[in-house]
Amino acid sequence: MIISVVLLPSPNNPTGTALPPEAVTVLCEAVGESGVVVVDEAYGEFRRAGTPSALELLPQHRNLVVTRTMSKAFALAGARVGYLAADPAVIQALLLVRLPYHLSAVTQAVARAALACRDEPMATVAALRAERDGIVAWLRGRGWRVADSDANFVLFGPFADRHAVWQGLLDRGVLIRETGPDGWLRVSIGTPDEMAAFRSALVELKELR
Ligand SMILES: Cc1ncc(COP(=O)(O)O)c(C=O)c1O
């Protein structure tokens, strides 16, 4: 028997855009009993107000799995820990095949402590979302095309020579990512001061459009 595993990053990287729930539903129905649909919500906590999580679809789809990492919203990439939510039958099946001792007791304790203290990281997430929405509006206001972002980064462009823009920003002390579709750049959301530095550096590079 062939089992399909369909992986969907939502919000996606590097666009930052979350999938509409209808897309997840269509795929869950298409895959049916012959597999599972895994929605990777690594950036789920950053999604825009009104953007639903695939967690809300779990009651309707027994073949849906939603994964989260603690690397992003909890800034815990060094702990190498995440979790998933799915139908109890899927969880039972995973418990049968998972490796023994795949996650140390210390890591589990760290993750539980972080969850118990989630108010602080969630306040940071709220500040980053507001900063992100501000950058999206600012870039659009200056005529850039910007992908809708439900993540802690923003993809914008297009540039005739994106490397020149990336280098120009770096020369001004601003490091962003040269990634994604040709001609586009990805900026991660930082502190208000860092975003102000990004904005003024980009304005100085306006001749590179
Ligand atoms: C879409 C997506 N999923 C998952 C991850 C993995 O995160 P980690 O391996 O730190 O849990 C990343 C990291 O960049 C990501 O962009």
Image (cartoon, rainbow, N blue to C red):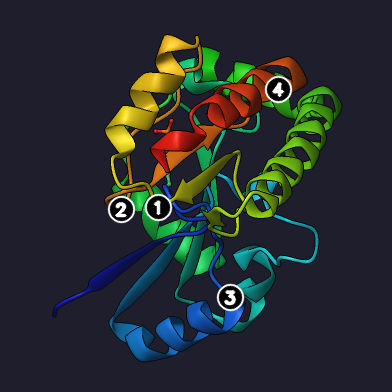
Q: Is mark 2 within 8 Å of ligand 1?
A: no
Q: Say whether disc 2 or disc 4 marks the residue closer to the N-terminus.
A: 2
Q: Is mark 3 within 8 Å of ligand 1?
A: no
Mark 3 residue crowding within 10 angstroms, few (<14) / some (14–19) / many (20+): some
Q: Secondary structure at mark 3?
A: loop
Q: Secondary structure at mark 1?
A: loop
Residue at x 54%, y 59% (from the top left corner): 17
> Can I make out residue 206 in this image?
yes
Give yes or no for contact between labels 2 and 1 (Cβ–Cβ under 8 Å): yes
Looking at the image, is mark 2 or mark 3 nearer the viewer?
2
- Residue type at mark 1? Pro
Q: Say whether disc 4 or disc 1 marks the residue closer to the N-terminus.
A: 1
Residue indicated by mark 2: 181
Residue at x 81%, y 32% (from the top left corner): 127
**What is the spatial separation of the Cα atoms under label 2 and label 1, in whole angstroms?**
9 Å
Counting from the top left corner in percent of width and height, residue 99 is at 29, 36
- Residue type at mark 3? Pro
Left or right, 147 with reference to 162: right
Residue indicated by mark 4: 196
Residue 120 to residue 33: above or below: above
Residue at x 73%, y 29% (from the top left corner): 115
Residue indicated by mark 1: 158
- Residue type at mark 4? Ala
Left or right, 208 with reference to 129: left
